[in-house]
Image: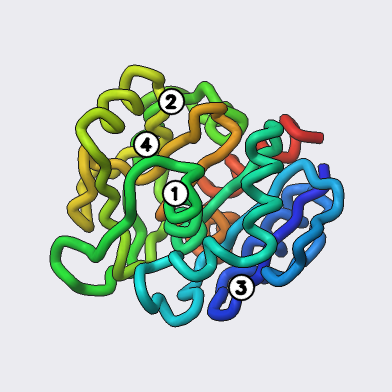
Amino acid sequence: MKAGVITFPGSNCDRDIATALAAAGARVERLWHGDAELPKLDLIVLPGGFTYGDYLRVGAIAARAPAMAEVVRRAAAGVAVLGICNGFQILAEAGLLPGAVISNAGLRFICKDVALEVATAASVYTAGYAPGATIEIPIAHHDGCYVCAPDDLARLADEDRIAFRYRDNPNGSQADIAGVLGPGRNVLGMMPHPERAADPLTGGSDGMTMLRTLVEALG
């Protein structure tokens, strides 16, 4: 399985997710936001960070980078696209996921391990978990509160597109949502960082389960 990790100005988790994916068995290529053309890939990752210093709205400038036009095209063609933290914000700004990610309810930066419910196992990202299972993955964000219109929320629930929910909502996200799938189920945006839970030596491996599942499913 070949994965591409796109680096934007202000990305700071690009090396982390590239390293974790390689440990999971993927061939990883590092890509640049200014590249209008991308190589053939099985998975595209938008990593965490603070692209363009979070000016305007979080992810708003990065969503208009040259590489993102191709990401949108690849997603429409069924290629798997994973957005983590700032990557989730970028996916929402690019229109690949409904809703928006805004400032935490407490207006504070939160960095800690959180318990998540696996809300669906029906995706290439979550198939390695039992539905309803509790996993632990770190978060690190100031703008992690997911909100969407009532119709979008109802659609997410009806179509089983809520991937993860917080067990103890740390940021005020609507319906405790920590991650959502796109309409084709090949796009996932999530605020928690699976790459930071990819090795027991650094605190846990629940995130590695997702990465290995991806490599097996897309290989």
- Of badges 2 and 4, the one in the foreground is 2
* Distance from Cα at disc 2 to Cα at disc 3: 30 Å
Image spot of residue 145 (x, y percent): 26, 55
Under mark 2, the amino acid is: Thr
Q: Are marks 2 and 4 in contact (CB under 8 Å)?
A: no
Q: Mark 4 highlights which residue? A: 134
Classify 10 Å Cα crowding around label 2: few (below 14), some (14-19), many (20 and above). many
Q: Secondary structure at mark 2?
A: loop
Name which residue lies at 47% across and 35% down: 181
Image spot of residue 142 (x, y percent): 30, 70
* Distance from Cα at disc 4 to Cα at disc 1: 16 Å
Task: Left or right? Give the position of 46 relative to 116.
Answer: right
- N-term-proximal mark, 4 vs 3: 3
Under mark 1, the amino acid is: Met
Q: Mark 3 highlights which residue? A: 8
Residue 181 in view here:
yes
* Distance from Cα at disc 1 to Cα at disc 2: 13 Å
What number is the disc on residue 120?
2
Image spot of residue 94 (x, y percent): 50, 52
Name which residue lies at 31% across and 39% down: 165
Q: Mark 1 highlights which residue? A: 190
